[in-house]
Structures are given as C-alpha cells and as structure tokens.
Amino acid sequence: MKTGEIAVNINGDLSDEELIERALMAERAVKRVWIGELEFFRDPLEVAELISENTSLEVCILLSPSRRSCSEIIKAAKKYPIGLIPGKSKNLSDFISCLKSVRRTAEEVYVGCSGKRLAKAVGKLSDGILANYVYPEYIKWLGEFEFVAAFGPSLVLPSTCHEDLLIAAAIVMGSNRNFLEHFNLSEVWNELSSVDFTCLIRARQRGESVRDVQDFKLIKKHKKLLLEKFTISGGIKDVCSRIRKLLDVCNCIVLGDPFFRDAKSMEKLPEIVNKIKN
C-alpha cells in the first residue's frame, strides 16, 4: 500500500451481482479493496476471485489461522496481498509461526491489530500494521511502526445503514481488554458485552431494522462515543476531516463495513478521494 492511499473493505454477504456492482463503484475512485473474513459471510477467497474476474482492482484478503490452515493462507498469499488477523486464536506463538511462513511467500503481508502486545510482536515481521481503530489517539497507543493503515467502520451519513455502523463500532470497541482498561472504557463495554451481536447482524442481513431490539437500544445509548471514537462517519466534510486527521498519524485508510453496503456512500467515494488528494 502507498502512503496516503484510501481503500475500501468489502465483505461477502451480498449477492454476486451486488458485490460486483460495489466493486465497480469502488474502481472509479480507489485501486484496492480488502475482503473480510467473518463467520457468517462467504469465504473471502470466493469473493476475491469474483471481484478479480470483473474488475481491475487490486484485491487484498483478511485471513485468520484460527479459521483455516496456514498452508491455505500461504497458497492465497501467492496470489493476493494478505492481512493476517488473529480471529478467535489466543495463541500468539502459533500466530507468529504462521506469519513467518506466510512472510516467506507473500509479496505483501500485513497484520490486523487491536492490542499493543501483538503489534509489538509482529511489527518487524510484516509490511505493516492494520490498526483496528480510526481515532488518532488510539492509533498512537498501539505504538510507532514504519507503516500503519487505519481500518474501521465508515459511512456517509445520513444513511439507511446507520444501524450497521453502530453495531460494527460496538464490536470494534470490545476488541481488546487492555485497550478498554487504558482508555477507561471497561465500564461501557461491561454494559455492551451481553449484546448478541450475531443476532443483530443476521437481522440486518435479512433487511430488518433492529431499532426496537433491546440489545440495539443498549448500543444506541452510547451512540455519541461510538460514532466519535470508533467510526469514520458524518457528512462528506466530516468524513474528509476525519481522514485527514488520521493521515497525520498513519499511512493509509481502509473504509470499513458498512461503507460498501451503502450505494450513496459509494457514490460519494470519488468526491471523498479527490478532496483528500487536493
């Protein structure tokens, strides 16, 4: 990735037609997309192949050794830039062992990090850190590295995807216990830790609003904090302002889910990229 680059995250829970449509929209403004790996989404390798066949985009994939063998990841790394993520794995030594093996094959390999311990351990073993935060103070907390990309929930508001944005922000907030303790967020997370995020996400995948669901009401209670500290969101001016501030402390930005879901946000992508460049 090049310094100052803006990329878009695309996840595999849309139809082929919709995924191609979003990828073509992205192609008008950016060179790269990142395909996420999540439990109830399609395999990112399938999505990557679909997008590669239908666009000229550079496709990068987030993969975790907690979900597939390291040999599978090494095979993928021969074709795509890889973002290696811990997933549910808590075994740092196994993760680092896989990273070293992938590093020997991959032209580009990055590591997704939400905690200082992992970031410090893998900083020199990869081409850069994919910071799971989009707030400058949180990026700085991870430490100093040669290359850092900020990767987080993004959206141009107002949007019909605002519920997805808040759900994603809440999930990101709870990614690392030490982070929560350092920034005095443990009390907030204790309130949110009982939320059934899978249930909320599945409802949104079905096109249902969750505004009246008690778990979502609990998330919405912390709306101001979540939007300000864990998203790149707001009107065009706000989104551009947040990106510029982030680029003061990191090298690149990946506009994360639900940005790609929202056709209106994707339509605004060329404008956003042009304003940042100029």
Image: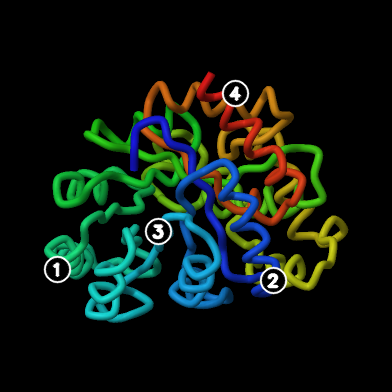
- Disc marking residue 60: 3
Q: Earlier in the sequence, mark 2 or mark 1?
A: 2
Q: Earlier in the sequence, mark 1 or mark 3?
A: 3
Q: Secondary structure at mark 3?
A: strand
Q: Earlier in the sequence, mark 2 or mark 3?
A: 2
Q: Is residue 128 above or below residue 86?
A: above
| Residue appearing at x 23%, y 47% in the figure | 127
Report the side of 116 relative to 7 (left or right). left
Crowd around label 1: few <14 · some 14–19 · many ≥20 (10 Å): some
Give the residue pinned by disc 4. 275
- Disc marking residue 101: 1
Q: Nearer the viewer, mark 2 or mark 3?
A: 2
Please name the amino acid that badge 3 sits on.
Cys
Residues under labels 2 and 1: Cα distance? 35 Å
Residues under labels 4 and 2: Cα distance? 29 Å
Report the side of 223 relative to 2 (left or right). right
* Residue 255 in the image, given as x and y percentages of width and height: 55, 44
User: Given contact means CB atoms under 8 Å apart, are the residues at marks 2 and 3 in contact?
Assistant: no
Crowd around label 4: few <14 · some 14–19 · many ≥20 (10 Å): some
Q: Earlier in the sequence, mark 4 or mark 2?
A: 2
Please name the amino acid that badge 4 sits on.
Lys
Residue most extreme to the top: 278
Crowd around label 2: few <14 · some 14–19 · many ≥20 (10 Å): few
Give the residue pinned by disc 2. 17
Q: Is residue 246 above or below residue 31?
A: above
Crowd around label 3: few <14 · some 14–19 · many ≥20 (10 Å): many
Question: Tell me, what colour scheme is on the image?
Answer: rainbow
User: Given contact means CB atoms under 8 Å apart, are the residues at marks 1 and 3 in contact?
Assistant: no
**Foreground: 219 or 123?**
123
Residue most extreme to the right: 212
User: Given contact means CB atoms under 8 Å apart, are the residues at marks 4 and 1 in contact?
Assistant: no
